[in-house]
Amino acid sequence: MRPLEGLLVVTLEHAIAAPFCTRQLADLGARVIKVERPGEGDFARAYDARAHGLASHFVWCNRSKESLTLDLKQPAARAVLQKLVERCDVLVQNLAPGAAARMGLDHASLAPVNAGIVVCDISGYGEGGPYTEKKAYDLLIQSEAGFVSVTGTPEQPSKAGLSIADIAAGMYAYSSVLAALLQRGRTGRGQRLEISMLEAMSEWMGFPLYYTLDGQPPPPRAGASHAAIYPYGPFTCGDGKQVVLAVQHDREWAIFCDQVLLQPELAKTYLGNANRLAQREQLRAVIEGVCSTLTAEQLVERLDAAQIANAQLNEMAALWRHPQLAARGRWTDIGSPSGPLPALYPPHHLSGSEPPPMGPVPALGEHTESILAELGYGAPEIARLRAEKAI
C-alpha cells in the first residue's frame, strides 16, 4: 500500500501554496477532495492555457485530486462540507485570513466532533501582528522576506523565476501534516498547524541573515554566480554556450588551475576564497580567456576529467529531454480534461510501497455528484442543491 492510503484530506485551496502541499499528500496515496467555487473554481485554473488549454500552475499542483463544487455562502453547501470534515483526517486551507474560522472550520470548532482532525492553516503573514490581514502573493512575500534584494544583478534586483515563497510554505505545510499524523498515531488526537509564507521564506533566508549579522553589508547581487564563493557560476565558451562550474575550496582550486586552466601557477596567486572573491573581475577575465578557446562540450570534458563540479545552463526545452530524467524513467502521462499530459513522478522513492497514483487533473466539479452520493445524498437532493446553485 501507499504510506497515506486510507486517509482523507479535504482542502479549501487556491493558487499554489496549499495545492502544492496537498498534491504531495495525494502522491503518497491520500484521498484529496478539493472544494471549489461553482462555475469558477480555483482561480489558478485561469492563470494561462499553456498545457493543452489548461493552466500550467493548475496542472502541476492538482493531479490525483477530486473536485467538489460548493458555494459556501449557502447553508446547504456548508452542511455538505461539515459532513466531510467530520470524517476527514486532514483539513488544509489557504483562504483569506479568518474566513475558515468564520465558517466554523478552525481546529477549535472541529476538534469536539472530530478529535483526530489535523487542521493546517496557510496564510501570508500568520495570525497576530500588524500584517495579519494584509494580502499576500508570492512576489510580495519574496520582497518582504528580502529575497528580491539579494537576487539579480548588481544593477537590478530580481524575483525568482518561479513561486518559491508559495513552494516554501507548501513544503513546510506538507512536512508538518506528516509530523502531526505521526503524533496522532501516538496520542490519538489531531492538532492545528499554522504556516506563514513570510516565516517559511524567512527561514530560507538564513544564509543572508547571518551574513549580515550585526549590521554587516549584505551579500552582493551576483546574477547567476554565487555571491560568496568564487569561481561558482556560469562562464561563456567559444561557441557562445555557457557552462556553470563550482570550485568550493583551495584543493579544488589547485586542481582547476592545473587541469582545466592549464595554468598551475595561478593557484598560489589566488589562494583562499576570500582572495578570489575580492579579485573576481580580474579572475573572471582569466577564466573566460581560457573558456573562449573551448567549446562548451570541450570545457565540460575537461572539468569532468578533473572532477570539478559543473552543469549545463539549460533552458526548459533541454529539461524536457534531459538524459538523466529519461534514463531513470521519471516521465509518465496523466489524464486531464484536455487529454493525456506528460508529468514527472514525484522525487520521493519509497521501496516498500506502491508507486505514486499519478491520477488525472480533475475538471471543475467532476466528482461533486459521486461525493454527495457517498455522503448519503439521493438524486432528488442533489438535483435540488444544483437547482439552488449550492453546488
Image: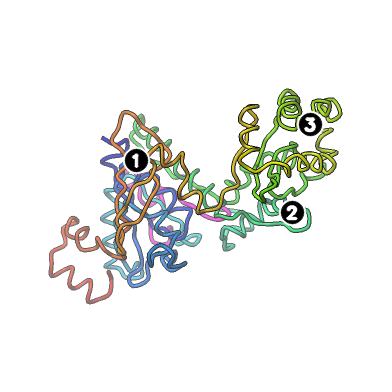
Decide whether residue 118 is among the magenta residues.
yes
What's the CA distance linking mark 3 and mark 1? 43 Å
Classify residue 325 by image quadrant.
top left
| The label number, if any, that marks residue 273 in the structure image | 3
Q: Choose mark 3 or mark 1, whichever is in front.
A: 3
Which of the marked residues, 2 or 3, is nearer the chain's N terminus?
2
Residue at x-position 66% and y-position 55%: 144
Residue under the image location 22 percent in, 58 percent down = 371
Q: Give the secondary structure at mark 1.
A: loop
Residue placed under numbered mark 2 in the picture: 153
Residue 215 seen in this snapshot: no
Furthest residue in direction bottom, as rendered:
387
Mark 3, other Cα within 10 Å: few <14 / some 14–19 / many ≥20:
some
Q: CA distance from mark 1 to mark 2?
A: 40 Å
Mark 1, other Cα within 10 Å: few <14 / some 14–19 / many ≥20:
many
Q: CA distance from mark 2 to mark 3?
A: 21 Å
Q: Is residue 85 depicted above or below 48 in this figure?
A: above
Q: Which residues are magenta?
A: 100-126
Residue 98 sits above or below residue 249 on the image: below
Q: Residue at x 39, y 42 (%)?
A: 330
Residue 230 quadrant: top right
